[in-house]
Image: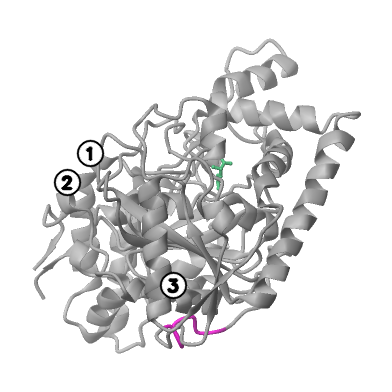
């Protein structure tokens, strides 16, 4: 079978490997070649893991030769955001603090993808410790958007989105605490899914905001993302928030949206700062869903405007306690000429963390101080309850809600240099993490003015993820199939 790696999605690769029309080794080699040729321009990878990839691929080919039944994603190259532990790789969180940290165990989500037959080709760039929306804060330098290398890929899982969009791998994992899967997916023209909180184990993912973090897949189709969810979802004894779950997410993916109700929040969609081409693309997506048989219903999310403020209290507080472990004693960078313990710890942190990480830690430390806590943390929790309630009420009327993923398309490096501007750009993604619901970004074409990819976000009630994927598949079907970015087609990674 002769094809470029970017022309094959995960479903096609697994099918071809099972049938024997390509070997897992050939696919792994094609993906590694594509990384060699394309990544110098994109810089999606922090580490490439050819030994792990070739060994896993060889194991699959051996199993096939022995007549064993192959797992569902046999031979599919995959790469992981670099906040996910994988034995045999470093897990740096794109930070100087963990620059040389070798994983001593494998995250459950990562292990489940490997058990499903995926072949690990590397670890992906991100904002340092997942704080950010552009991947510009990585200690290892930024990742470029494959649609315009002068622009950001989004973040914090920018490497995960860019690696798929440039055709180096068909499938990646990212994590989403306030939009970090959906927003980069939107900027890079790929599908990115944040499951309901509790759907996927967080064990082995370096924690940012433990009540908000969730792992999810990136792919070029909703079907590929659903296949990944089949592997990822379910209870893990090592994460007490994970829920038992065992359904086939692909089962009714093509059943359409006839008779379903899709919510529209007009006040949000037309809010200040939302670019006209984004509004147009979302209106078009709404029409397409109507044409497929859904009914549009106006809904209200009255407390949505408070989501960013609440998040920037809750998330830094959780980050502050989660990052306390990086003290140069147990983990992380350690200055070798420290005078005493206090000097060592403070210098480990001063030298090891970048500016955005320090900003979040200081914010969290302040917000949790006695006398301050009652003024901010407590009200933020109350806002959290109100937002959760808003969504519950909305879902009494509709099956899902449609809105933009981001108010704008990918911006240029340095363009949002003021942190507050960057924080405000998460206006459509954050409330979902606060409520714990599921959300997906689906490519809905390109901006009429910018020519850059636009993502539509569909969000749905907790633990109805399979239904959300079905609605997303119906929306996706009204557009041309997602390809890799035009500058990266047929640029290496050939299967012969
Ligand atoms: N952009 C948001 C932040 O910086 C969300 C990040 C994320 O989801 N990891 O906090």
Question: Is any part of residue 353 visible from this angle?
Answer: no
- Numbered tag placed on residue 249 in the rendering: none
Q: Position of residue 92 (x, y in %)?
A: 49, 39
- SS at circle 1: helix
Quick one: 94 or 56, which is closer to the camera?
A: 94
Query: Sequence order check: which comes first, mark 3 or mark 1?
Result: 1
Separation of marks 3 and 2 at Cα, in angstroms: 33 Å
Q: Position of residue 11 (x, y in %)?
A: 31, 76
Q: Main secondary structure of the magenta part?
A: loop
| Quarter of the rendering occupied by the N terminus | bottom left
Q: Determine which residue is flagged by label 3.
A: 472
Q: Determine which residue is flagged by label 2.
A: 37
Count neighbours of disc 3 (C-alpha within 10 A) and say few if under 14, some if 14 to 19, many if 20 or more: many
| Quarter of the rendering occupied by the C terminus | bottom left
- Numbered tag placed on residue 40 in the rendering: 1
Count neighbours of disc 2 (C-alpha within 10 A) and say few if under 14, some if 14 to 19, many if 20 or more: some
Magenta residue span: 247-253
Residue 329: name its quadrant.
top right
Separation of marks 3 and 1 at Cα, in angstroms: 33 Å
- Label 1 near label 2: C-beta < 8 Å? yes
Quick one: 378 or 166, which is closer to the camera?
A: 378
Quick one: 198 or 26, which is closer to the camera?
A: 198
């Amino acid at each position: 079978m002769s094809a470029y790696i970017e022309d094959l999605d995960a479903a096609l690769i697994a099918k071809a490997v099972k049938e024997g029309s390509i070997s897992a080794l050939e696919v792994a080699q094609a993906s590694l070649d594509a990384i060699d040729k394309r990544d110098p321009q994109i810089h999606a990878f922090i580490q490439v893991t050819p030994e792990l990839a070739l060994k896993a691929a060889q194991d699959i080919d051996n199993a096939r030769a022995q007549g064993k039944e192959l797992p569902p994603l046999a031979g599919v190259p995959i790469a992981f955001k670099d906040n996910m532990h994988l034995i045999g790789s470093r897990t740096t969180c794109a930070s100087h603090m963990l620059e040389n940290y070798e994983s001593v165990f494998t995250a459950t989500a990562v292990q489940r993808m490997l058990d499903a037959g995926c072949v690990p080709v590397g670890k992906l760039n991100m904002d340092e410790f997942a704080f950010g929306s552009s991947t510009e804060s990585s200690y290892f330098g930024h990742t470029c958007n494959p649609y315009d290398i002068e622009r950001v890929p989004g973040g914090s899982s920018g490497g995960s989105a860019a690696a798929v969009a440039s055709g180096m791998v068909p499938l990646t994992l990212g994590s989403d605490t306030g939009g970090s899967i959906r927003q980069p997916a939107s900027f890079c023209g790929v599908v990115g899914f944040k499951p309901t909180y509790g759907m996927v184990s967080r064990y082995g993912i370096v924690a940012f905001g433990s009540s908000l973090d969730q792992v999810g897949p990136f792919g070029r189709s909703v079907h590929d993302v659903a296949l990944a969810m089949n592997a990822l979802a379910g209870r893990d004894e090592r994460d007490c928030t994970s829920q038992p779950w065992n359904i086939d997410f692909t089962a009714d993916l093509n059943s359409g949206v006839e008779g379903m109700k899709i919510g529209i929040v007009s006040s949000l969609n037309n809010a200040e700062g939302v670019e006209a081409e984004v509004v147009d693309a979302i209106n078009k997506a709404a029409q397409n869903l109507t044409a497929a048989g859904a009914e549009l219903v106006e809904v209200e999310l009255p407390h949505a405007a408070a989501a960013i403020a609440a998040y920037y209290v809750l998330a830094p507080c959780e980050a502050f306690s989660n990052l306390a472990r990086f003290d140069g004693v147990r983990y992380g960078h350690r200055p070798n000429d420290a005078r005493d313990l206090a000097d060592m710890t403070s210098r480990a942190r001063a030298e090891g963390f970048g500016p955005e990480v320090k900003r979040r830690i200081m914010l969290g430390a302040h917000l949790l101080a006695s006398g301050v806590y009652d003024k901010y943390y407590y009200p933020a929790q109350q806002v959290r309850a109100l937002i959760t309630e808003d969504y519950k009420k909305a879902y009494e009327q509709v099956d899902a809600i449609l809105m933009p993923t981001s108010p704008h398309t990918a911006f240029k490096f340095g363009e949002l240099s003021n942190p507050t501007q960057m924080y405000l750009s998460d206006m459509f993604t954050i409330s979902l993490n606060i409520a714990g619901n599921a959300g997906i970004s689906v490519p809905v074409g390109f901006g009429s003015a910018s020519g850059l990819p636009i993502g539509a976000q569909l969000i749905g009630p907790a633990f109805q993820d399979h239904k959300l994927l079905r609605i997303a598949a119906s929306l996706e079907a009204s557009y041309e199939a997602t390809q890799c970015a035009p500058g990266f087609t047929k640029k290496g990674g050939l299967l012969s």
